[in-house]
């Protein structure tokens, strides 16, 4: 159980603790205890179903940002073998906000790229809370082109609130780096599988987010702008973020409904932070399934479909009155 819980999870946590305490104090030897535990576990299952099936968009944002959710480094350890990290953009420096490298999944070599927020305070500062600088996007593109050169599929994990908005990043061409990635990724001649595992925020996500298949974990989100920033711009009040989250249609179900993504990845009960291994198992099965599917598509068709997929987003029709 994660030591950190969200306010709407309070009734669930309290009931879980009650079950745990009853189990420790009395055990399961007598019939009365067994019956009580069975009753409480049934109640817990129903409470979880009711809670997580009726989450508001803002509550889903909170779950996506849960500090105990697994990050790219966690998934690499649990899913891939022989991972070799590659550093630097060959122009300025390495950017720890984005991890890049080569690994194997079920014996198949793949290129891996992913946002990394860092677990503890020192790590979070080192990884800049997952907000990449221009050199992070240039590093990612360098490694993607390496994957194209050696015909290796590209797997990308996204979990970032946004690209880093600092003056230094703007001076080094933040917008240009993101734009160049979007352009280059649209025509890379290898399969690209995108998975949003937490926050998919703004251009920070889109800078490594162009692929053949884009998937979002059940409680993750994908948005043109973080809810707080949206509220600050529209109403000059960041506290209206819950209202903005609802308007942005950023939940996995809405994203699928609007065809912004291609599928939803199931999460363990209560979110990925509650069971890393189960979350990784589901993710691994999903990756293998889509890699098998994409590997059968001819390269020229793959690129055509990818361009068409993104070109069709945001199309509207004029209706004559």
Image (cartoon, rainbow, N blue to C red):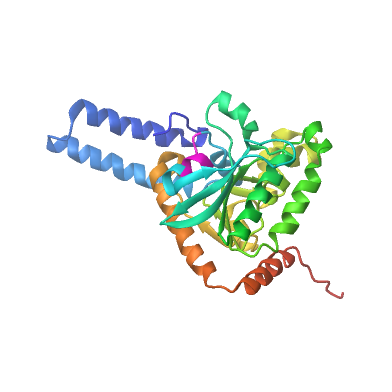
For the N terminus, give its image quadrant.
top left
Say whether residue 74 is magenta.
yes
Q: Position of residue 236 (x, y in %)?
A: 80, 35
Is 211 placed above or below 203 here? below
Is 255 placed above or below 58 here? below
- Of 310 and 73, the residue lying toward us: 73
Q: Which residues are magenta?
A: 68-76
Position of 200 with respect to 272 (left or right) is right
Say whether residue 101 is magenta.
no
Q: Position of residue 84 (x, y in %)?
A: 51, 44
- Of 69 and 206, the residue lying toward us: 206
Is 165 placed above or below 220 here? above
- The residue drawn where x is 48% and y is 66% is 292
- Of 23 and 144, the residue lying toward us: 144
Is 6 placed above or below 303 here? above
For the C terminus, give its image quadrant.
bottom right
- The residue drawn where x is 42% and y is 44% is 78
Q: Position of residue 199 (x, y in %)?
A: 61, 44
- Tell me where residue 133 sits by quadrant: top right
Residue 268 appears anywhere in the view: no
- The residue drawn where x is 28% and y is 28% is 21
- The residue drawn where x is 25% and y is 30% is 22
Residue 29 appears anywhere in the view: yes
Position of 144 with respect to 176 (left or right) is left
Which residue reaches farthest top?
122
Q: Position of residue 318 (x, y in %)?
A: 83, 71
């Amino acid at each position: 159980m994660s030591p950190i819980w969200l306010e709407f999870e309070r009734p669930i946590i309290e009931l879980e603790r009650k079950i745990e305490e009853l189990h420790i104090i009395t055990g399961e030897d007598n019939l009365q205890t067994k019956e009580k535990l069975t009753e409480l576990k049934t109640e817990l299952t129903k409470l979880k179903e009711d809670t997580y099936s009726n989450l508001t968009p803002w509550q889903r944002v909170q779950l996506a940002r849960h500090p105990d959710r697994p990050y790219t480094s966690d998934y690499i350890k649990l899913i891939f073998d022989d991972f070799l990290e590659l550093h630097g953009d060959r122009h300025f420096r390495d950017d720890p906000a984005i991890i890049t490298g080569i690994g194997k999944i079920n014996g198949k070599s793949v290129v891996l790229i992913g946002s990394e927020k860092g677990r503890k305070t020192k790590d979070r500062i080192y990884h800049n809370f997952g907000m990449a600088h221009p050199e992070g996007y240039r590093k990612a593109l360098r490694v993607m082109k390496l994957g194209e050169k050696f015909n290796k599929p590209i797997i990308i994990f996204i979990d970032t609130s946004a690209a880093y908005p600092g003056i230094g990043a703007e001076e080094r061409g933040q917008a240009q780096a993101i734009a160049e990635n979007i352009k280059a990724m649209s025509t890379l001649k290898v399969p690209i599988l995108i998975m949003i595992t937490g926050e998919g925020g703004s251009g920070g996500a889109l800078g490594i987010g162009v692929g053949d298949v884009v998937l979002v974990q059940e409680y993750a989100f994908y948005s043109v702008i973080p809810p707080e920033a949206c509220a600050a711009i529209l109403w000059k009040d960041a506290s209206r973020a819950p209202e903005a989250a609802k308007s942005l249609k950023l939940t996995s179900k809405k994203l699928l409904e609007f065809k912004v993504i291609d599928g939803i990845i199931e999460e363990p009960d209560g979110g990925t932070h509650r069971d890393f291994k189960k979350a990784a198992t589901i993710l691994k099965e999903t990756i293998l399934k889509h890699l098998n599917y994409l590997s059968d598509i001819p390269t020229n068709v793959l690129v055509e479909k990818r361009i068409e997929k993104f070109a069709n987003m945001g199309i509207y029709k004029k209706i004559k009155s």
